Structure formats: C-alpha cells, structure tokens
Amino acid sequence: MLPWGTLQGAGTMKRLILAGLLAAVSTSARADDDAIRDANRQDVRCVLAMSVMARNETYKQWGTFGVFFYAGRIEGRDPGFSLSDAVKREVRLIRPDEYNAEIKRCSDLLADRSRAYEAMKPPAPRGSGR
C-alpha cells in the first residue's frame, strides 16, 4: 500500500503532464496557424504579382494561370479564406519596388510546379501520330 503523499504526488504529476501536453498542443496549433497565415500572405502576394503580369499582353496567359494557381492554393489550404479582403489589405502593404521580385519568385515557383505536373503526364500511345 502506498503512503498518502505518494498518491497525492502521483495526482500532481498527472496534472503536470496533462498541463504540459495541453501547452504543447496549444503551441503546435498556434505554430500551424502562423504557418498558414504566412503561406496565405505569400500566395496573396503572388495573386497580386501575377495579376500585374497578366496586364502585359505577352504574359497574359501565364499571369492569368498564376492567379488561378495561387488562389487555388489558398482555397485548398484554408477554405473560406477571404481572398478579396486579403488582396485589399496586401495591396496597401506591398511597395511598388517589390513587384518585380514578387513576379520573379511567383513565376519561378509556378514554372517549377508546371514542370512537375508536365512530368506526370503519361507518354503518348504508340502510333498516335507523334
């Protein structure tokens, strides 16, 4: 039979462990929220950059593709996210001299993803005219 102090200490230990687990879960959830918020902000900046790119007739198709790609990433990551509110907020924060760097960053990432998707295509069947 265990002395009373040992039982009381075990209860205290269980509460400490539970408190530690709850703190870890809370910290993890907060880190996840921060990561989602940061990723969304980066993708909102890409939506803006690619929409600027789409104004140039030479890059219109690529820029439009980029807008849909980045908007889709946000929606897939965070359904219900208000893209219009985020765009209104971010357009006030992004400086004009930042657009070229954002266009390059977003276009490069889009090109990487595009090549990856292209690589997944099955080869054309033999005798299909190629």
Image (tube, rainbow, N blue to C red):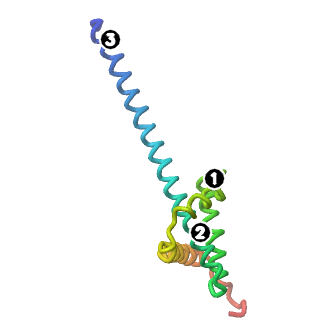
Circle 3 sits in a helix, a strand or a loop, which is it?
Answer: helix
> In front here: 121 or 46?
46
Under mark 1, the amino acid is: Phe
Classify residue 129 by image quadrant. bottom right
Residue 39 is left or right of residue 53, and the answer is left
**CA distance for labels 1 and 3:** 49 Å
Residue beneath disc 3: 7
* Eye-nearest disc, 2 or 3: 2
Give the residue furthest to the right: 128
Give the x, y percent position of residue 91: 57, 64
Under mark 3, the amino acid is: Leu
Classify residue 126 by image quadrant. bottom right
Classify residue 66 by image quadrant. bottom right
Q: Quadrant of the N terminus?
A: top left
| Image: 24 above or below 94 | above
Residue beneath disc 2: 48
Mark 3 surroundings within 10 Å by alpha-carbon count, few (fewer than 14), some (14 through 19), many (20 or more):
few
**CA distance for labels 2 and 3:** 61 Å
Residue 74 is left or right of residue 32, and the answer is right
